[in-house]
Amino acid sequence: MKFISAATAIAVTLGFSEAFVAPIASPRCRSNQPIINHDGKTISSSSTLPLSGSRLDGNQSDPTFKDISTMDEMIKKMVEAEEYELPNAVRRAFRVCSSPQFFLRIATLADQADDAAQKEKLSTLAANLATTIEAVVSTTKGQFDDRAKEVEDILKQASEPSSGEFLVPLSTERGDAMRQALVELEPSKLDESFLSTVDAWIVKSHQDGMDGMVTILQKLLQQYAGIQVSRARAAQQGTSSSEAANLLEKLLALDTDTWDTEIRNGTSSDVTTSGLVAEIQRTMESVILGLENGSMAQRIQAEYLKELVTRAEAVETN
């Protein structure tokens, strides 16, 4: 099974034209029906799932006010940084730094600058950044190849063992198998290259109408976020005896589709929904703010925890 090559992942991430991107199979994904099997054959079925795209809009949408603030902070740091420091900065937030919006923001700030020296600094940054991104892509191609293979291996765990086909929605067994493959992957490999690869596959699957594959890949990102947040909490806090902390840990290990039920069942006089929300917010402050600003890891984990807060508050109001 090969959905998209490493070169394709890089191309989509950098916002290259679709013509540059190698084609992949484009079956429609159907509810409770096969999507595509390991040899790439498409399967016909009925009951189309709603189309959904990557939640990490990146190059696909206009930046929000928060996005602009994040970019401005990153640009300010990069302008003052030494040229040799740029490669590491780009690797830590590759998706943001390589987006057209980031370069447009640099150009906007240069136009708005009253000081000629500041204009020159921003112009120099744009030129150095473009060169640095090319160098980073060139030197990390092997890493993207590795991450593409690892994502593919994880996705295979979501396929039916008897046929090699993918069924949406995933069964509990297949979802658990995919999560276990993520848990067993070396933590250092769950980096920006891994996330960029997954997000690029989401974008490409969305473009090709592979609705169910989008759903599976988004599930993978949700599982990634739960695992990484749980690991960070353990590293920072150790073992907690708080009932709210215990409930949060349980939710981090569960499928997001079960959250509403588990929150209702888990809250009582000992653990209120407001207490759970407070525990989540403490986690956001201690874990999310500690991640590289503007990185995909920060964005994915923040969105995941925000969704959990929304679910908890909805249960409280109901």
Image: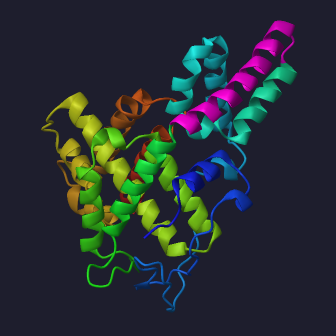
Q: Taking 123 as reference, is 267 left or right?
A: left
Q: Position of residue 270 (x, y in %)?
A: 17, 48
192 and 52: which one is in front?
Answer: 192
127 and 172: which one is in front?
Answer: 127
56 and 243: which one is in front?
Answer: 56
Q: Position of residue 72 (x, y in %)?
A: 67, 25
Q: Position of residue 93 (x, y in %)?
A: 54, 34
Q: Position of residue 196 (x, y in %)?
A: 51, 47
Q: Taking 262 as reference, is 284 left or right?
A: right
Q: Residue at x 42, y 58 (%)?
A: 314
* Principal secondary structure, stretch drawn in magenta: helix
Q: Residue at x 20, y 55 (%)?
A: 268
Residue 52 vs 181, above or below: the answer is below
In the rendered structure, does residue 210 fall within the stretch colored magenta?
Answer: no
In the rendered structure, does residue 123 fall within the stretch colored magenta?
Answer: yes
**Does residue 310 appear anywhere in the picture?**
no
What segment is highlighted magenta in the picture? 113-139
**Does residue 41 appear anywhere in the picture?**
yes
How many marks overall? Answer: 0
Residue 138 vs 146, above or below: the answer is above
Image quarter in which the C terminus is found: bottom left
Residue 306 vs 212, above or below: the answer is above
Q: Residue at x 29, y 41 (%)?
A: 187
